Amino acid sequence: MDRKTAWLILNMIRGIGPVSIRKLLEIYGDPIEILNSSKKIAQGIIQSDALEQLKNWKNIQWEQEIERVKSQGIKLVSMDDPEYPESLKQIPDPPVILYVRGNIPDTSVFIAVVGTRNPSPYGVVMAEKFSASFAAWGICIVSGMARGIDSISHRTALRMKTPTVAVLGCGLSNIYPPENKKLAELISETGALISEFPLDILPEKFNFPRRNRIISGMSRAVVIIEAGLKSGAIITAHLAADQNRDVFVLPSDANRLIGRGNNLLIREGACLVESPEEIIEYLNLTPQKTDIPETAEKLPEGINLTNSEKLVYNLIKEKELSFEEIQMKTGENLQNLMRILTDLEIKGLISSAPGHLYSCKNK
């Protein structure tokens, strides 16, 4: 057995997280030795249920997991591998192994762009503005592929033809949210989908703080576009601060509930910014590209649409429509329509709003 397989087995045991594995490493020094010595591990080092699984690790279906990983075109990246992000090794509880579909971009600068799942029009515009500028400068955007700000950030990077990284709070066999399956495919073509969870793990609520520490841990800085008082973006910001990462926050209207988390973070000491250029200057970064767009809404040249895309786009050009209205008018099935709408968003032709409403960006 090699070390990567040992890391995989340890990672598949429910109840043994990075902190518990670190404790075991302090005693046994090596993941293979942890498995070989599992029968001797005393009570109290890890939880009793997890200890029982560890002692019977040979019953875990790790061989089937490895076969499925290979068949699905996924790579296993451990801390021993050169592809493992160097910045992620620096956090107190780095994941021992990553499931990666695609390739983690070989870049020196990752910046996380995160925010609410239900952004205001202001949040949408600012997410596109900051993400477009970062992408144009050759910075890799890291986010969580959630609805709202996360998805907008990924789509903007793709539209700017810059790789982006999505970190999931579930296994890569359970893409979440389901309407982002097409987006996930596009991200993995030039960038990477990343998860520390075994393939079949569902998007359970307690997985997302673990996901968020990877988003911030990979990144040179975290940008909060728009966030409520109790949100995953706030958790990510606090994790980033604990990891000694810079946290940048856009100011929010005091009357807008969805952005109250931004103002809270500013009171706590996060850096207030109003433009992406401020972040570049603060971090003393040297942009890798020079074709920075004047606006995030500029229509890319040379756009080609399929007949189905033309039909949907022409409908949305007339007026804002809900997903259900578009489906009724076109007769497209659910999966095809989600794919078409995602493609139109990536091409910069339409935008989505809370409530699955779609409108044209260039009337």
Image (cartoon, grey):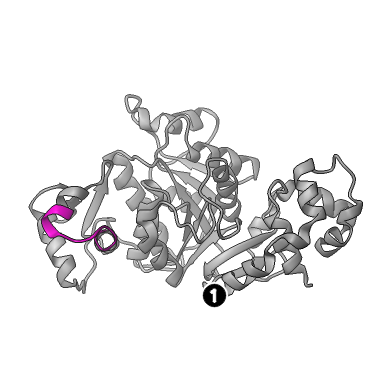
Magenta segment main secondary structure? helix
Residue named by callout 1: 71
Magenta-highlighted residues: 327-337
Task: Please tell me whether residue 152 is drawn above or below residue 229 in the rendered image.
Answer: below
What quarter of the picture does the C terminus occupy? bottom left
Q: Position of residue 28 (x, y in %)?
A: 89, 56
Observer able to see residue 363:
no
Residue 244: which quarter of the image? top right
Q: Residue furthest top?
A: 255
What quarter of the picture does the N terminus occupy? bottom right
Task: Please tell me whether residue 251 is drawn above or below residue 133 in the rendered image.
Answer: above
Q: Is residue 329 left or right of residue 262?
A: left
Q: Which amino acid type is marked by label 1? A: Ser
Residue drawn where x is 49% and y is 51% of the image: 112
Q: Residues within 10 Å of mark 1 (few under 14, many from 20)?
A: few
Observer able to see residue 300:
yes
Residue drawn where x is 58% and y is 70% of the image: 69
